[in-house]
Every structure is written in C-alpha cells, then in structure tokens.
Image (tube, helix red, strand yellow):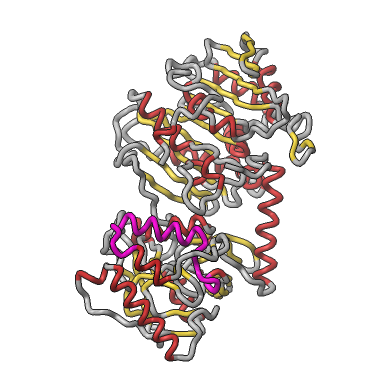
Amino acid sequence: MNRPRNEGLPEQCGRHALLVCVLGFAAGAAGGGAQTLPLPPRSSDAAGGSAFVRSIEALSLKEREEHIAAEILGGNVPEFLRHLRTVTMRDGTNIALLHVTPNYLAIGSDADYFLAPMTPTTAQRIADATGCVLPTPKMVDAIHAAAGVHLEPQPISPSAAMTSVGVFAQHNRMVRTQLLARATDPAAETLVAGHKKDLVISSRLELVPGKVGIYGWHRPDGTPLQPLYAGHANTWVDYSHGVRLVQSVMLVNGSSNTVPAVLADRRLAALLSNEGVIHSGRYPTPSLFGESVIEFNPRPDVRVVINSPNSAPFNTVEPVKLVIFAVANGNTIEQTAGRRLRPGDDWHFDIQHIAAQMRWLRVHDTNHQWVVAYLEASGKSWPAWRRSHSDGDAQIREIVDGIAARFTNSAARIILAGHSGGGSFLFGFLNSVVAIPDRVGRIAFLDSDYAYDPSAGHGSKLARWLENGDHFLTVLAYNDSVALLDGKPFVSATGGTWYRSHLMQTNLAAFFPFKSAKAASLEIFTALDGRIQFLLKENPDRKILHTVQVEKNGFIHSMAAGTPLQEAGYEYLGTRAYERWLE
C-alpha cells in the first residue's frame, strides 16, 4: 500500500493540516461556500441505480450491506448528492449552521439512482468514513423545514415483502414519479424531504442497545407520520428507511464545533436535540470477536470507547488490565483500533492496529481480562486540547479516575499508554499527581514522549513509582532528529522522541543501574530486570518510522516487556504477529 510520506508525523505537522481544515470550513460556511462529501470521483463504468438493484436482489442482508457500503465509499453516488446544503437551527440566542446531504444516500448516476435503505451499522460506517454523523429527530425537523421540495409520504401496505429489494426499487420509482410530476429535476441540488423515514440517533437508544431509531416521513405541513421509534432490531431494513448525512464539523455562534461535542454539551445540546444531552451520538460498530464496545463523552470535547472481551465488562471478578490509550495526533479512535482495509477506507486504518494487538494479548494472557479504553480529543490532538484548557491536567486525572471507577467488582490495574501526541495525555496525568498512584501498573510511551521535562518532575516521579516491583515502564522511539520530510528535517535536535527518550533514560540512570545493548539497529537500555525498557531505533536511511514502531508489534511489546510474554510468539519490529485477529 502506498502511504503519504507524512504518515504519523508529530503534532507540529498534523496541527497545521487540522487548522487548514477547520478554517476552510468556517470560511466556506460563513461565506456560503459549498461543502462536499469526501468521496472518490464516480467511475465512468460504475453501475447505474437500476443495474445495482438487479445485482443485489438475490443477496443475503450481510452481502447486500457490504455491496451498498462498497459502492458508496467507492464513489458510485450521484453528483448532486455530493454537494451539501446549509440548514440553520436556533435555540434562544444560540445559532447552529449545519451542512447536510440534499437527499438520502443513493447509488448510481444523476439520471439513474437508487435511494438505498440500509442498516444503521452500514450507515454509521459510511458516516464515519465521510466525516459525518446521522441526524437527531430535531435535525430531521429542521431539514424538512428548510427543504425546497416537500414530498408526500407514500406508504406501501405492510407485508413480508417490505424488507425486500423489489419493494425498495418500487418505492424508489414512486419517489421519482413524484419528483417528475412536480416538474422537479430528480438530480437537482435542492434540499428534498418528506419521502423517507430517517435513521436517527437518540438518547433512547442508550437504553435499548441493538435497536435502530427511525423518525420522520413528514407530511408537507411539517408533521411527522413516523414518531420516534426504537422498537426494531438494528438488522431491520424496510423500503421506507433513508439515510441522510450531516457533516460533523459545524458552526455554533460563528465558531467551529462538531455535532458530537454540541450534543454532549449541556449548554448547547438543545440546539440539536429535543431530548437533552446525547452522550453516544453514533451506532456501535459490531465486532467479529464478540467484544463489548461502549462509547461515552466524559467531557463534551473528549470521546471514549471502551472495548472489552465480553458482554459484561464492568461486572467481572477477573483481574482486569485496563489500558487507557490516548490516540495519536490526526487519528480517530476507529483508525487507531484499525481493521482490514475496505473500499474507500483511509490509509490510517492500517498503521497501528491496536485492536488486533489487544486480541493477541487476550489470547496469550488468559490470567487477566484485557480491556482497552481509547481516548480521543476534539480536533484529534491531545497537545492542542491541553493548551486550550487551563485545568486540562486536572480534567485528565478525573477522566482516568472515572474510567477506572466503572470496574466495580475488580480493582482494575491501570496501564497508561499513548502514541504520538497521545503522550501529552500521559504527561498531563503525571502533572496532575504528586505521586503516580500504585494502581498504575505500567506506563508505555509509543514514540510519544515529546513532552518529557525533568524540570516538571517527570523523571523523579517515574523513579519513585518504579521502586515498586510491580510497576513497568516501556519507551519506544526512533531517531526522528535525522528523519526527512520532502528532503528536509521536520524535528529539531532536541524536540523529538529520540532526544527526549535519551534524556529520560539518562535521568532514570541516576536512580537505577542500566544495561545497554545493540541489536538490529536498536539501542536497548534495560533496568530492574527488564521492568524498565528503552528500545530506540537508529535511522541511517533517514525515514519516518513514527507508526512503523507501533504497527510491527510495538503495542504488544509495550504491554509484554519485562514479563514472561516478552517475545513469546512475536518479534518487535518483525512481521505482524496479530494478522489473524484483524477485523
């Protein structure tokens, strides 16, 4: 796979791209500029809607959903659907500016398209890949009110066939006939509403996991034919369902924000929701491995996803190893977890694979229940998040305590880990405590110790904590001081992890005797019978190895170092030992 040359760059590189993105959105929205879905161009030989319908008629639900996702994420959508329309919402003095698709997700061309009903799981997958979310019922109301074309709902008599592709196609033709009868170009970019029920997000879904929320099908006078309903299983799909995407990035009172952050903010949630705060504004992604996935927002601008190997993650009596993993700059939680690449996937899904490496650990260490809590800051940068919060370090301590407190029947052994800018979260925690708590059993810096500062007491705190024979420290880094981006260095001699890791090791050497060795271009420093390990990779070819260290079993090693698991069936920087556990 060809990857961009700036893969996994530290925060000073990723922050610029994020700033350009946010400023570009704000400028475009404020000036009425067009927003578009980030999908590949439609291929000249892509199937039209009619041909696509014929190709899926005999497929199972699972096969059909895969084909729908592949076509949309591969760019086989009408041109008109790519150009988002603006919807304004108000609550008191607060004003929100959203960008939404002008119609429901469709497959095919402007002249021949199929409005595709799908499960919420597939809809969420497409939303995630395009930087979008699904609407709340209040958003659906606002979209209908803003629409330039209002269509009358056209129910088909209930029957077993209402979930069949044939009836999907029948309803698609009925909608098209409505548009033509109104002398409306079916491919016009005008906002069209009223012809489908929306798949929606709702706080009600938090009480009934495994269900789908549907709402809408508004009459022209604005009253919904379908009240909010969450009684169907999330595998139920009928002809009346439609998926309208809402761009996650939005404007609130002229400032950039995101839909999930607004929904989680008690001061602003009423802008977008009639149900108050919605903590989990998305449908969970099912796992092939029977895992439990729980998502919540401990702060409006912090997202947490907890992945556990069983369906009752917080009531277990087994010893728990709770990995609190702060994600890298510019990466989502889903990209950090990783998976086998699907059509339309961004390359970030194939550079870390923390989920598969966690499964490797679960299989090889059955004496503990391994749980991972992924933490993502808004803006996808923990350093930027900390700079924007004067009490950020205290908030980090509260977030860690809150996650650990969920395990009521078993004292969870905390492991603090982070990649890239995620290391900033770890140092925020260190700054917030006088002494590192004993329940923190391991700290792992995966090329992430940019913020290490002896003057802040980091070295002495780590040394006192490491005096406990049950505590472990692992540091992975490479020589980023000589790495080149477009032929030029991008890290200063003292600003990267190569320098900071050597500085940390030197400081700890004042407390503990170290052994040093070299193997396969690695500088290896160990102390306390392997409980402290620094693996520092030399870089004679001046490459960017920021994510390679993680991808090539780096997370496994950062968890196994100094234990009997170390190098038992894997090799750090060797071939990926976790391939069979990729989802």
- The segment highlighted magenta reads 56-81
Name which quarter of the figure residue 527 lies in.
Answer: top right
The answer to whether residue 300 is magenta is no
Q: Is residue 267 visible?
A: yes
Residue 6 pos. (x, y %): 68, 42
* Residue lying farthest to the front in this orientation: 45
Q: Where 29 sits versus 492, above or below?
A: below
Q: Where 113 sits versus 305, above or below?
A: below
In the rendered image, the quadrant that contains the N terminus is top right
Q: Is residue 105 visible?
A: no
Using residue 98 as the reference point, say whether residue 560 is left or right of it. Answer: left
Q: Main secondary structure of the magenta part?
A: helix
Task: State how many labels appear.
Answer: 0
Name which quarter of the figure residue 173 lies in.
Answer: bottom left
What residue do we see at 36% from left, 36% from top?
407
Using residue 235 as the reference point, say whether residue 489 is left or right of it. Answer: right
What residue do we see at 48% from left, 91% from top?
183
Residue 431 pos. (x, y %): 62, 33
Residue 219 pos. (x, y %): 37, 84
In the rendered image, the quadrant that contains the C terminus is top left
Q: Where 239 sits versus 450, above or below?
A: below
Along the line of sight, which residue is nearer the eye, 97 or 285? 285
What residue do we see at 47% from left, 38% from top?
401
What residue do we see at 72% from left, 24% from top?
540
Q: Where 525 sits versus 446, above or below?
A: above
Residue 388 pos. (x, y %): 65, 49
